[in-house]
Amino acid sequence: MAVTRFGLQIPRFTYPGVPDAELFERIAAIATTAEESGGFDSVWVMDHFYQLPGLGTEDEPMFEAYSLLSALAARTSRVRLGTMVTGVTYRNPALLAKTVTTLDVISAGRAILGIGAAWNESEHRGYGFEFPSTRERMDRLEEALRICRAMFTEDTPSFSGKYYQINEAFNVPRPVTPGGPPVMIGGSGEKRTLRLVAEYGDASNIFGDLATVRHKLDVLERHCADVGRDPAEITKTKLCTMVIAPTAAEADRKVEQIRAATGFPEEQVRAMLVAGSPDQVLEQVQAHVDAGLDGLLFNMMDAHEVDNVRLAAETLARFSF
């Protein structure tokens, strides 16, 4: 069964007219609308401490991801909950496994562990985290994946790696999800990341246009063959930004606002989007599925206006895989 088909990522917490003290209630409204309207089966937040380039300025509000997901677990009952994704350098992997297990228990088995090699040097400097080389971060990611899997499945696991060690570690209460929360590995590097997906991942989130998606899926399939794994066991998704409106003309106006804010050419902006009227959005979703994806994750820059989330969810509920 797919880890997720359609997920909503909440990418920013800067909402016009909403003071900091009321931010969580608006975020909870976004999540519950996504759940109640039927089309989304997962809700995601970024695990970052600074806002990302292209989404806002670094000093915009950002919530600690797992505290926020735990609070959303208490407000929802159906959608899965995960980070898109946790940088391996941000948390000791045993503690990360404990944290995600706790979310799994709180949510009655709805947690997803989203994890990647980390990339944002600015927030590493700001928070005093080490920012090692790409090679070392990838090595750390592999050790973390092994530790998390062991913490999910073994009673008292031990592990001795170059960067991380655990010694007969307890992780009680145990995960509610059999075998532990599914592991989503973010990124699409062909030599290391997709190889780690083949070896350790339950889901893979990749990036790029449809031609790139097809190529990355071919690479993943080859890695699966090398390690003796059926690629159908891995849920393949792509993170997009959705711009949806009742009519194509209204959606075009939203796209123009994004183009003006980013300064990118319209063609480049549209390449990053799934955009249009509900019927147009469904056509673009079908094209992604035809390219070999099992589902899509969506940013929505206007999700704080929950009617937009409702329209997106109701539209996606019409799609049949």
Image (spheres, rainbow, N blue to C red):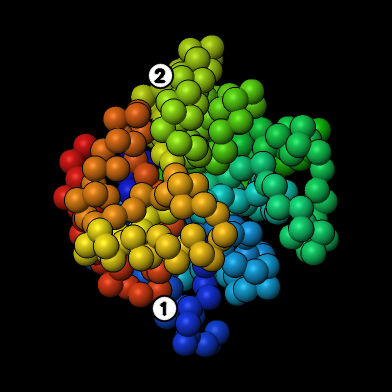
Amino acid type assigned to the residue bearing label 1 in the image:
Arg
Name the residue located 44 percent from the left edge and 28 percent from the top edge.
211
**Which image quadrant for residue 135?**
top right
Between 239 and 164, the one nearer to me in the picture: 239
Please name the amino acid that badge 2 sits on: Asp
Residue position marked by numbered label 2 in the rendering: 230
Q: Position of residue 72 (x, y in %)?
A: 42, 68
On the image, the x and y values in percent for residue 242 come to 37, 55
Distance (Cα) linking label 2 and label 1: 41 Å
Label 2 SS: loop
State left or right for residue 23 relative to residue 117: left
Crowdedness near tag 1: few (<14), some (14–19) or many (≥20) residues, C-alpha within 10 Å: some
The residue tagged 1 is 26
User: Tag 1's secondary structure?
Assistant: helix
- Tell me, yes or no, whether the two marked residues, 2 and 1, touch with CB atoms within 8 Å: no
Horizontal and vertical percent position of residue 246 = 21, 64
From what the image shows, is residue 34 above or below residue 82? below
Identify the image quadrant of the C terminus.
top left
